[in-house]
Amino acid sequence: MKIYKLNATDGAARTGEVATPHGIIRTPAFMPVGTQATVKGMHPEAVRETGADVVLGNTYHLMLRPGAERVAALGGLHKFMNWPHVILTDSGGFQVMSLSAMRKIDENAVTFRSHIDGSTHVLTPERAIEIQTLLGSDIVMQLDECVRLPAERAEVEKAMRLSLRWAERCQRAFAPVRDGRSLFAIVQGGDDVALREESARELNAMDFPGYAIGGLAVGEPQEVMLRMLEVVAPLLPADKPRYLMGVGTPDDLLKAVARGIDMFDCVMPTRNGRHGLAFSRFGPINLKNARHADDPRPFDEESPCAAARTYSRAYLHHLTKTNEMLGAILLTTINIAYYQELMAGARAAIAAKAFASFADGVAAGWAAGDLPTR
């Protein structure tokens, strides 16, 4: 099944469209993370107003609360969270790594102890597909094992091969789904070129509608991540979307776009917004900094985001210092809007064959910002 339309290229950078049952994802695309059926601090309508085409939900967390069967009985995740647009669900593979103290892995499954109440849950590849099908997500991810870097090659290789076998099981489990939804495979292999190449070749042979690159931004330097992208992206089909999971900073995004990546997700804009750090054309700005206490200027009078244009830096500083809920809401909105603005600019620049100059201009703006970055 072909879901990707390539509209233009500029070097390795691409702009295109991913077709799903709930709409088109314009790429390059940043997906706000809505782990538990909500992008923290934002109404769904506000998320859409930033320009987002798609949000991400999480199999592991929604499996625990409120439960996939309950969501299905209530009409599916789109209706449940009042988001009638595209939803991608992560399979829970990241939690295999992040909750390593509370799980065990064997050939058949990951067995978790819930971080909520200690109850035991078994997540097989088949159950991961079943949960995502019940949720009704437009793009479903295979279950994989993600390894934190640095790691021994033997550990990385073992996880990569298990992920390949689980990809086959996920594909078989997903085969009866005939409603336009798509299953993406995940390339693993850590920071090892040969393992990454093998994973990409094996998954290509299985002919998935889309491909993700997982297991990066998990402890390795940026240059290692970029090297892995330079190895993997050219091996993936040019007529299918490429998704870099869990990445990252604005700089990460632009450098990955330059290497042929189409889709991204990361908690960085929402998490940092809740803790007083805003992203902007000036670079990252810490609103907790006392410098902002008497600054009456808008956060950014040129931003397309109303929250950035309307509220003063002094007020945002006050909200952040007093831990007022509105501060987290406004800064999260500003951050998601900036990420969407960045992706829209990248799409336009690629179409105009001017991506390199666009990326250089963005970086120059960060370097010459009129506010301190820390």
Image (tube, grey):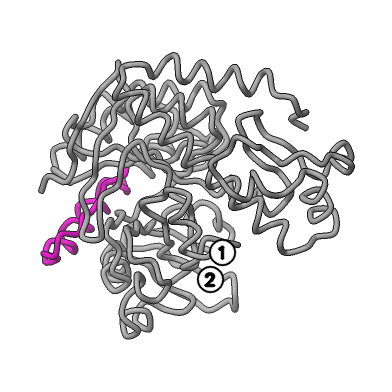
Quarter of the rendering occupied by the C terminus: top right
Q: Do callouts 2 and 1 mark residues in contact (Cβ within 8 Å)?
A: yes
| Quadrant of the image occupied by residue 116 | bottom right
Residue at 29%, 54% in the rendered image:
142
Other residues around mark 1 within 10 Å, as few (<14) / some (14–19) / many (≥20): some
Query: What is the three-letter code of the residue carrying label 2?
Result: Arg
140 is within the stretch colored magenta: no
Give the mark nearest the N terminus, 2 or 1: 1
The part of the chain drawn in magenta is: 162-186
Other residues around mark 2 within 10 Å, as few (<14) / some (14–19) / many (≥20): some
166 is within the stretch colored magenta: yes
Image position, residue 193 (x, y; %): 36, 23
> Quick one: 297 or 251, which is closer to the camera?
297
Image position, residue 122 (x, y; %): 40, 71
Residue at 54%, 26% in the rendered image:
222
Query: What is the three-letter code of the residue carrying label 1?
Result: Met
> Could you say whether the residue bearing mark 1 is in a helix, strand or loop?
helix
> Quick one: 136 or 171, which is closer to the camera?
136
